Amino acid sequence: MSTATARAASLPPDTPVITGWSAVSPYGIGRDRFAAGVRGGAKTAVKADASLGSLPLSDVCTVPGFDIQEALGPRGTAKMDRLTALTLVASDGLLLDADGNRAVETDDLTGVVLGITMGSLENVTDFLRQSYTNQRPFYVDAGRIPFGSLNHAAGATAIRHDLKGPNTTVAGGRISGLLALNYARRLMGQGRATKYLVGSAEEFSAAHAWFEHTAAASGDSAELLGEGCGLFLVEHAGRAQRPPLAAVLSVETRVDIDDDPHAAVTACARRALQRAGVDAAQVWAAVPCAAPTAAGRAEHEALAALVPAAALSRVPSMELLGDTSAASASFQIGAVLAVAEANPDSRGRVALVCAVDRDGGVAAAVLRLMGEEQ
């Protein structure tokens, strides 16, 4: 029995497992660039391109050199929003090999669930601006209407790869990646999907930068914004076609209704660990979302009081990527997998991934790291 088969066999067959992942991030396009950047602790901030116009901060954490038509070709991309393009490129990295051939088998019950904040804010604001500034309110670029829908990126991914299973978009800000993972886990458990492309995405734009700047609470640090998309292939352990990289032991969510993010994160993380049958002292790596807000600081303090001190230092801070909003939690999971891949001691260990959003959303996931086959 191979080590990969043994690792899969050690799990209950209906356990959701992550068997592949990809990323388009401020480190560049592809899982390898993301992993190298995270493990090296490299910062990603650069001066914003002048074409973006006036911005609240001159530095940004954007995907370097990302051009939609260069990445995806001219067909159907003339009016495509950046959010959809980032998602499509990430999906190619997950499902296709280096030659562009399908590398992952799918069936009619392979689904897509994508976490976002509010879709392409740049596309929506540009469209509304046309209605106000053009000669007539209805003199707008109708070709951009489809790209303004919240579920366009998820739908476009399914169309591009002929995925016919449940297709869903969840909007939850920084916790979106964990909400998406929980959604996939539940539908797979109900037999409505055999496997899922799961992840979350965020685009950088001037509209998004000004929105975040305006929405920032008094006393919060200036938000260095990032962008990108992280996607994972989630299957059941008993039917997985690839060696599992991590088992999803539990996902828990909360809403902070008492304006006490420290208590909400503590309760959410404890409940997630309890559902996973794991003691807090067993956590090998804990990864907060590092939001530049009071909730983000409370999240870090709550985890520091809950898990061993070493756990919070094993994965570099997500501050390196800037505030990637909806893409945050997916990048956190990717960072855990990237660090674990280079550390044989991680096999069998537990990782705790947490996220908080300004609207009170809190989520936590517990993963059992399985390691890469050597």
Image (cartoon, grey):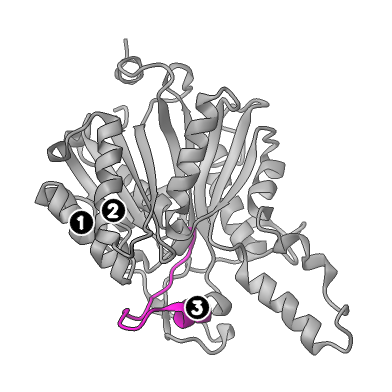
Q: Is residue 368 left or right of residue 170?
A: left
Residue 340 in view, yes or no:
no
Which residue is located at x 30 percent, y 65 percent?
A: 296
Q: Which residue is mark 2?
A: 265
On whether residue 227 falls in the magenta region, the answer is: yes
What distance separates the C-alpha of mark 1 from that of mark 3? 28 Å
The disc, 3 or 2, on the residue closer to the chain's N-terminal end is 3
Left or right of residue 221: residue 177: right
Residue denoted by label 1: 302
Crowding at dot 2, Cα within 10 Å, few <14 / some 14-19 / many 20+, comes out as many
Disc 3 crowd rating (10 Å Cα; few below 14, some 14-19, many 20+) is many
Secondary structure, mark 1, is helix
Provide the secondary structure element on which disc 3 rests: helix
Q: Residue at left 59%, top 61%?
A: 83
Q: First in sequence: mark 1 or mark 3?
A: 3
Q: Main secondary structure of the magenta part?
A: loop
User: Which residues are the magenta region?
Assistant: 210-228
Location of residue 55 with respect to 34 vertically, above or below: below
